[in-house]
Amino acid sequence: MEKLFEIEFVQTAAYYSVSVLALLVFLAIFETVTKYRNWEEIKKGNMAVALATGGKIFGVANIFRHSIEHADRLLTMLGWGVVGFSLLLLSYFIFEFLTPSFKVDEELARDNRAVGFISLVISVGLSYVIGASIIAR
């Protein structure tokens, strides 16, 4: 099996497949912690939710990009991806905590695009910090 994984195409397909599957799982987790339904809101044209969700997708993908770059094995890459996602999820709760004058989820559900944009920037920005902190092989 290790010989097969040495083929670059197979390795790329494996990293891609695991990353996409993890992204879907992580989006499902985000869906459970928000008070609104991401895809229903996006279907209705809620740009704030689309911005926030896009930021989460970019953030998770960026974390996986760094974990792929620094991992020497698929399992190590997935492990760093899970750690990075957990930190990104923690950031979501910190953002909610640091804005006591309004509820982020409620503002996003109301299509408050300013809150959606800040949510996007937080996810993307912190994904770079998280990615940069991933320990090299």
Image: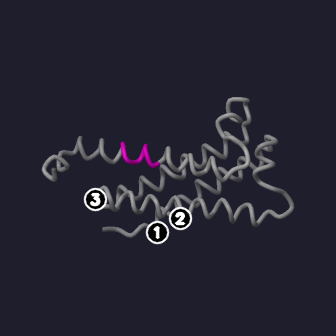
Q: Which mark is residue 73?
A: 3
Above or below, 36 relative to 70: above
The local secondary structure at tag 1 comes to loop
Label 3, label 2: how many angstroms apart (C-alpha)? 22 Å
- The secondary structure that dominates the magenta segment is helix
Residue 99 percent coordinates (x, y) = 79, 62
Amino acid beneath label 1: Ser
Residue sitting at x 60%, y 43%? 54
Return the disc, 1 or 3, that comes first in the chain's sequence: 3
The local secondary structure at tag 3 comes to loop
Residue sitting at x 75%, y 66%? 97
The local secondary structure at tag 2 comes to helix
Q: Mark 2 points at which residue?
A: 129
Circle 3 packing at 10 Å, graded few (<14), some (14-19), many (20+), is some
Front residue of 122 and 13: 13
Residue 47 percent coordinates (x, y) = 72, 37
Q: Are marks 2 and 1 in contact (CB under 8 Å)?
A: yes
Label 1, label 3: how many angstroms apart (C-alpha)? 18 Å
Above or below, 112 relative to 76: above
Residue 97 left/right relative to 24: right
Residue 20 painted magenta = yes
Residue sitting at x 20%, y 49%? 5
* Magenta region: 17-22
Above or below, 24 relative to 63: above
Residue 66 painted magenta = no
Quadrant (top left/top right/bottom left/bottom right) for the C terminus: bottom left
Q: Are marks 3 and 2 in contact (CB under 8 Å)?
A: no
Q: Which mark is residue 133?
A: 1
Amino acid beneath label 3: Arg
